[in-house]
Each structure stands twice: as structure tokens, then as C-alpha cells.
Amino acid sequence: MMDVSVYAGNQLGAYNFGPEHPFGPARLDAFLARFRETGLDRRCHLAEPAMAQRAEIERFHTAAYIDRVQRASVTGTGYLDQGDTPAFVGVYEAAARVVGTVLAAVADLVSGKTRRAFVPIAGLHHARRDAAAGFCVFNDCGVAIETLHRVHGISRVAYVDIDAHHGDGVFYAYEDDPELTLVDLHEDGRFLYPGSGTVEETGQGAAKGTKLNIPMPPGADDRLFFMVWDQVESFVDKARPEFILLQCGADSIAGDPITHLAYSAAAHRHAAIRLSILAERHCEGRLLALGGGGYNLYNLADAWCSVVGALLESGLTGPSGARAVRHTGTN
């Protein structure tokens, strides 16, 4: 069994909206260049992308919406939402490959083939069941959660999101699901898209109290991140999840062109290490990190490589978080 698998073949980079769009074609290349420069590629199992079948995407999305994406994929014209997410020729296949790659990582984790995994072009957390939103065509997070529940028989799933934007597509799809523990640490919606994720939103009905939103003020830095992290960790620990998803968007790093938070990659590293420890305690190590947003290429490479390094380092800790005798540094 490999400790850490990274799913980052070049085909995954086909999910982009052109060089003039924030979610452009250089994002995957920036990560892979740093990934190789730091030698992380020699310490991980490298896995190729996979294509999702339509029936798999339908676990989360409506048939009518998938039909619409397929039509737009042929013409390559217009927008799939109100102006953030343009269609392009092949958009269906590109988005289906993101979903399929995430599902391949889920299957490898559940089977024990790997212990922790990272997919850089993934974590498309704004897409709704029946619509695109915020650069997100298909919600791979939602498809992964449905697949864990329905296919793999895993009921208690924890979803932790540290992207600058509130993961509204996941939150509202599972607002009334008591089996999904959700923590979303994001820039306050009064200042940033999508404008949701208040502290009062804690779940509905039987799921009330299973969701935790932590809006952060513009300019929030590592000091504030670390201050609130204990609350995140204790919330997840109490839920005793069987599988953990981490959406580790790099747009919360200082200097992103479309957000206003000011973390360093140390925040992402800390989140990955601490959630890995919880995964060892509750989930047989099963932690899947998804790249999410990030539109400053240096930040993106720095944060995502810090996450991968943390996943590797966390293999040297036991379920209690105690450091093993053997040690190798992270990037």
C-alpha cells in the first residue's frame, strides 16, 4: 500500500476556462512544476485521471442539468451559470474527468490501496445539483459523498473546506443530512461570493448542529486561522467520521487576486496534518484532499505542495499524533 497518492495527469488540466479566465490552463502546470522541483513526486504514488460515467455524475446532479452541459459541450458557447462559468468545446468531458479522478481516489482509499490522496484540479464546491456556479460545472465533492454513502456503505463522512469561498454547493445539498459533518472556514460572505455561510447556519432538522460555518474577516492571517482551528478539529473529532474530505483551496493565501484573506501555506499544511491524525484515529487513515480554488500561481503551488508534504509527514505519526522515531521533512 502506498501512503500518499497524487492524481495529476496532464488530462486533468483540460478543466479550465482559457488563459483570460482566473481558472486558467496554467494552474495544474504550476503545481506539477513545484511538485517535481521539491522532489515530492518521488515520494508519492502518481496516478492518472479517470473519466466518470454519466450514471456516476447522476448520483449528485439532475439528468436535465447533465443534458444541458452535454449540449453546451458540443457548441462551446454561452455560460453555464450567470457569467462566471463559460462553456467550451469538451467541457462535459473535462468536468467528467475531474469527477472520475476523484471517484478513483475514493475507491483507492476505501479499498486500502492508498492511505491518503490528493487531486489538484478538484473540489468544485459551488456547483448545485441542477446548475453550475462559480467556475464549477460538476460538484465532485457531492458526487464523492453520494458515492461513499451509496456505493461504499460509508455513512459518517466529514467535509472540511478552507477555500476562501463558502462551499455553498455542498453545504445546501447536505444541510439536512445528519451523516455529513461539515466545517467551512471561509471569508465572510458579506465581502465575498457566494455571500453565504453565516454562523447561524448549522444544519436543518435532524442535521441541526452537524454543520459549522466559520466566517473569517478580510485580512485574516495565520494567527487567526490557528486560533479557530481547535474548534474545527474538535468538531470533526466528536463526529468520529469514517472518511474525511479536505477542500484545500489556495485562494485563502495572501495575495490571491480575487479574495481578501491572508493565510500562508502553513495554514494548509497544518490542516492537512491535523486532519490526517484524525483520519488515523477514526478512518483507517482515509483522507482525500481536493485542490479547490486559488488564482495566484505561486500561492497555489506553495499551498498544494505543502498539503502533499503534510500528507507524507503525517504517515510518520500514530493515531494520537505522536511523532514516530523516523522523520523526513516536508517541503
Image: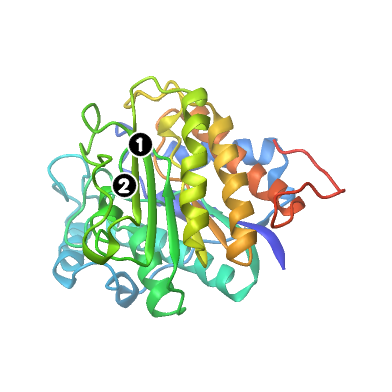
Residue 52: which quarter of the image? bottom left
Q: Nearer the viewer, residue 14 or 254?
A: 254
Relative to residue 273, is residue 267 drawn left or right?
Answer: left
Real-space Cα separation, disc 1 to disc 2, in angstroms:
8 Å
Instruction: Measuring from the top left, give residue 235's x and y in whole percent.
Output: 46, 51
Q: Which mark is residue 186?
A: 1
**Residue type, mark 1 in image:** His
Name the colour scheme.
Answer: rainbow
Instruction: Measuring from the top left, give residue 29's x and y in whole percent.
Output: 52, 40
Q: Residue at x 51, y 23 (%)?
A: 223
| Cβ atoms at labels 1 and 2 below 8 Å apart | yes
Relative to residue 120, is residue 130 drawn left or right?
Answer: left
Instruction: Measuring from the top left, give residue 37's x and y in whole percent.
Output: 68, 35
Query: Could you tell me which secondary element the residue under label 2 belongs to?
Result: loop
The number of discs equals 2
**Residue type, mark 2 in image:** Gly
Q: Is residue 127 visible?
A: no
Q: Residues within 10 Å of mark 2 (few under 14, many from 20)?
A: many
Relative to residue 48, is residue 81 drawn left or right?
Answer: left
Query: Could you tell me which secondary element the residue under label 1 belongs to?
Result: strand
Q: Residue at x 25, y 58 (%)?
A: 175
Q: Residues within 10 Å of mark 1 (few under 14, many from 20)?
A: many
Instruction: Measuring from the top left, give residue 96's x and y in whole percent.
Output: 35, 63
Q: Which mark is residue 167?
A: 2
